[in-house]
Structures are given as structure tokens and as C-alpha cells.
Amino acid sequence: MKLLFAILSVSILIVTGVKDYCRLCPDHVACNKKNEFASKCVNPKMVELNKGLFVDEHNKKRNLVAGGGVAKLKPACRMATMTWDDELAFLASYNVKQCDMKHDTCYPTEKFPHSGQNLALHSDKNNIEQAAVNMWYGEVKTCEQQDIDSFPEWNRGFHIGHFTVMVRQENNHLGCAAAEYDSNGYRQYLIACNYASTNMMGGFPVYNSCSKATTGCKSGTNSQYPNLCSTSEMYKLNGWINNELFRKENVFENVLSGWPQNGISYEC
């Protein structure tokens, strides 16, 4: 059986500090909008995801990379353990209910104002959690240490964006949603994962490298994923971007105008 995958990733930056979604940004995915399927969706329904599997698949990949398991990439000093966040998953559900593989323009939360996002389209319902994560992770083949040390501009970053948001040091939470619907005579499965943090700022490290994993962890390590910090590790998710620089450089506008919005299709 042929499986059709399409993946698309972009991480949108929003500088804000309030809870009201409309005040976070006027075009927020949840601003004055009902959380329901778009009228264009054909026979849609939500897919019940295995939350634990999604979290575990991400953490296994993070643990591998952080421990130096990828020969060309150095170990990570202080990579977070990911846990599930219901609000990120809630906002991801708005995306998949559009039945269109297209990134949300704005989707932050008060807790995670610089949220990132990965999307995947799958033609088979079986193991969609693992299939999506493996496809995103597959970009490790084109990622170099220089990309980890300083995330590149979009023309190169586009080809490693899914992988790098998965292994971003501070990404300690994720929430995912999936929907199924008919399209061109086939059943399609659209998956969206929203993350605590983005990898979009060019020039910032994806993670800080060390000669040995976890040497920078302040709270200890995770017994299940020994190359990751414990779940009690604290990260500065609201302040890693210089807000004044962000405003002066018009980063948000540059992201929207410069990042490709079309999916990448694969057959296997």
C-alpha cells in the first residue's frame, strides 16, 4: 500500500502576555471562532490520539539527539523532557478542523507566547503518531552542527524546520490533534502538533551543545530518558527573544512573507 505523507512546518512568533486569545493577536486561531469543522470538510471527525505515545516518540528522539546518538551532532547540555499540554492540543484542534494542511497565522497561549507548530498529512490511520514523528525527524539527515549552533535563514531552515522544533532545548510541552475527512476520493488524516517554543529565529541556537549530555541540568535528569533534564527543570519560555529587537526587525511580518507555505509530498 502506498502511503501519502505531506509535511509542513513553520513556527510563528507572537510577543504577548495576556490570556484573552483575541488580545494575544486579532487573527488568533481561537479568537471569536467556534471550535467546529469548516463547511468544506467532507465526512469529518476527530481522531482519538494516543497522547502518551506522541509524548514518548518525541522524547525518544530528543533523548537520542541529546545523548550524541546522531554522530554529526554534539550532545545537548540541557534539553527538556516534553510533557502534554491540553491547551496546546486544544488550539491544534482548530487547525485540523479546517481540513486543509495550512499553518495557523497566530496560535500562541499566555503561557507559550512563542509557540511552534508541525503539520502532517497521512493516508493511513494506523500508527499516525509514530508516522508523523518519524517523518518530521527524518530531516535530521540534512541538519548539520552549524544549524544547531545557529538556526539558519528560512531558505535553509525550511528543510530542517520540523526536526529542529522537535529537538529545541526549551520545548518542554506539546499538544497535538488529528482529524480525518474525505478528499479526492481518499480518506485523509491531518495531524497538528503545537509546541511550547519555536525554532524560527535565525541566529539562535536550537540547543546548547556540551561534551556530555545533561551537564547543564539544574534539577537532575529524567530516569526514563537519561539524556534529558527532569520534568521539573525550569526554562525561560517567555523571554528568550529580545522583544525590542523583535519589534524593530519586524520578525513576524518577515516570517509570514518569507516562509514557504506549500507542503512537501512523499510516497513510500
Image (cartoon, rainbow, N blue to C red):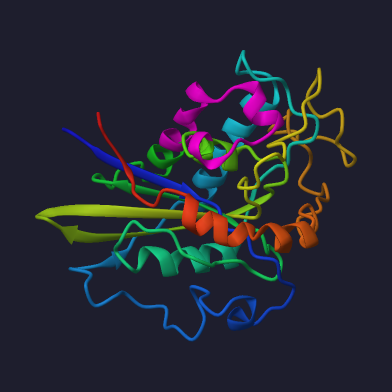
- Residue 236 lies in the magenta-colored region: no
Q: Is residue 175 visible?
A: no
Q: Quadrant of the N terminus?
A: top left
Q: Does residue 76 appear left or right of residue 141 in this picture?
A: right
Q: Is residue 87 above or below residue 11?
A: below
Q: Position of residue 111 (x, y in %)?
A: 71, 66
143, above or below 187, in the image: above
Q: Magenta segment, principal secondary structure?
A: helix
Is residue 49 at all visible to an observer of this figure? yes
All told, the count of numbered labels is: 0
Nearer-the-camera pick, 56 or 4: 4
For this view, does 255 lie left or right of residue 236?
Answer: left
Where is residue 78 drawn, in percent x and y?
Answer: 79, 35
Quarter of image, res 110: bottom right
Magenta region, residue range: 134-156
Q: 124 or 240: nearer the eye?
A: 240
Q: Image quadrant for the C terminus? A: top left
Percent position (x, y) of residue 225?
69, 32
Residue lying at the far top of the rendered structure: 71
Residue at x 65% of width, y 55% of height = 196
Seen at 63% across and 18% down, the residue is 69
Q: Nearer the viewer, residue 204 or 93?
A: 204
Which of the two residues, 59 or 265, is positioned nearer the viewer here? 265
Q: Where, by quadrant of the figure, is residue 79 drawn?
A: top right
Give the residue at the far bottom of this rendering.
32
Q: Position of residue 100 (x, y in %)?
A: 30, 61
Is 54 displayed left or right of 122 in the figure? right
Name the residue rendered at 45%, 29% in the picture.
138
